[in-house]
Image (tube, helix red, strand yellow):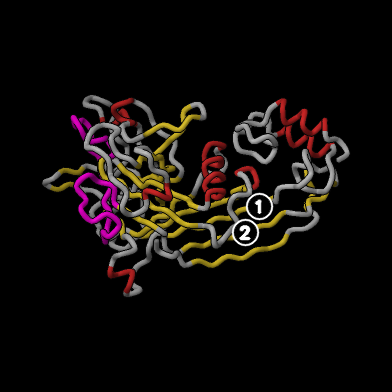
Amino acid sequence: MRTASFKYTCLFMAAIPVLQLGTQVVAQQSFEISLSVPTWDRWMYPYNFQPGERVAGPTFGAYGSDFYDDRAGQNLISFDTRESITEDLGAGSYEIVAGRMTIMLLDNNTFYDPTPDSWQTWLAGGPEDDDLGRACIISGAGFRGGYDGWSFGDDGDWGVVEHYGRNVYPIGYVDGDAVDISRNLAEGFDPKPFGVGATDEVAIGAPMPDLTTLTFELDTSDPDIQCYLRNALDDGLVSFVLSSLHYGSHDGGSYPQFILQENSLVFAGLANAPGLELEVVVTQPSATAGDINNDGGVDVSDLLRVINEWGCSCCISDINNDGRTDVTDLLAVINNWGG
C-alpha cells in the first residue's frame, strides 16, 4: 500500500452552542485535511493489463453495447484518511462541512462541460445536447465479488465483461438505496453526482488544454452523499469512481485522459496526482448513554437533536446504531434523562 502524503490542522472548538439552547459541547474538533496523493488510483477497464500502474486513466462510454456498461472506462481513486483523522468513532461522529477532489487532464482532446446532460440526449431522435462536451463526474464506489475498498486496492480482480459485471462500480442513490449507475443510459435515469468536474481556467464549450485541473466539489448537503462520506471516514478509506460518457471505441474517440500518480510528470513535479481536501467536524462519542452531543448530561438538547435528525441513517443521534434515528433513540434519551 502506498503512503499518502498529507497535511492537516486540528483546531479544538470549545463552547459551541447547540440548537441555540446554551448547551456547550466540550468534545468537538474541526479538521482540515489535505491529501496530495491517493492511496490507490486505478483505471477500471476490462482490458487493463497494468492495474494500479497506469500513467493515465481515460473515461468514456459504450452506450448500446451488448456487454460493456454505458460507463465503460472508469477510474477508482481511494484515499487513506486514518493518519489524518481518527476512524471507528461511528459514522454519526463525523460531519463533512465541505470537500473536493482534484485531478489533472493529460491531453486536450475534450471540450469543457460542467453540467451533466440528460440521459435522453444520447437517444436517437432525443433532445440535442445544448452545449459542447460531456461532463465528468465522481460518484461513490460500490463493491461486489466479495471485495471492499481495502481488499480491492490496486490488484483486485476486475470482474467479468458483461453488464454489471465489474467488481467496483460508481453508485448513486434512489430513495436512499445505493444503485450501480454504470448503465444509467440503458436504464433511463439521471444519477445524482457526488461532484462534477469544474475549472475556472477554461470557458464552457472551449477545448480543455493539457494539464487542466478539474475540481469536483462534493455535494455535502445531500444526505445520502453526506452519509457515504461519514461511513468512509469511519472506515478510514474514502473511495470515488470517476466516469464520463464521452464517445470512445477501440479505433479512437474524443474522451479525457486523467493523470494518475504513476505518471512521470508527477515524479518530475510538472503535474499533480489526484488530491482530496475535506473539512470535517468530529464529535467524540460520549460514555454516557443518551448524551448525544457529549456535553456531560442527558437533557433537552439531546432530545431535540433526535427530533431534528429524525430518520437520518448515519447521524450521531442513532444511539443504538440500528441504521436510523427513530423512536428507539428518542426513548433512549428519555430513559437516561439527567444522566
Residue located at (35% from left, 40% from top): 169
323 above or below 43? above
Counting from the top left corner in percent of width and height, residue 120 is at: 31, 28
Q: Residue furthest left?
A: 251
Judge by depth and name the residue closer to the eye, 55 or 131.
55
Disc 1 element: strand
- In the rendered image, the quadrant that contains the N terminus is bottom left
Compared to residue 171, the image places residue 99 above or below, namely: below
10 Å crowding of disc 2: few (<14), some (14-19), many (20+): some
Q: Residue at x 45, y 54 (%)?
A: 101
| Label 2 – label 1 distance at C-alpha | 8 Å
180 in the magenta segment: no
**Image mark count:** 2
Q: Can residue 49 be seen here?
A: yes
Residue tagged 1: 282
Work out which residue is located at the far right of the displayed protein and give it: 338
The image position of residue 57, as x and y in percent, is: 28, 54
Q: Please, what is the three-letter code of the amino acid marked with disc 2?
A: Phe
Does residue 201 show up? no
Q: Are marks 2 and 1 in contact (CB under 8 Å)?
A: yes
- The numbered dot on residue 165 is none
- Check disc 2 and report its element: helix, strand or loop: strand
The magenta segment:
43-71
Give the side of residue 178 with respect to residue 303, left or right.
Answer: left
Q: Which residue is mark 2?
A: 31
What's the residue type where badge 1 is placed?
Val
Give the image location of residue 89, x and y in percent. Answer: 63, 49
Magenta part, dominant SS: loop
The vertical placement of 157 against 307, above or below, is below
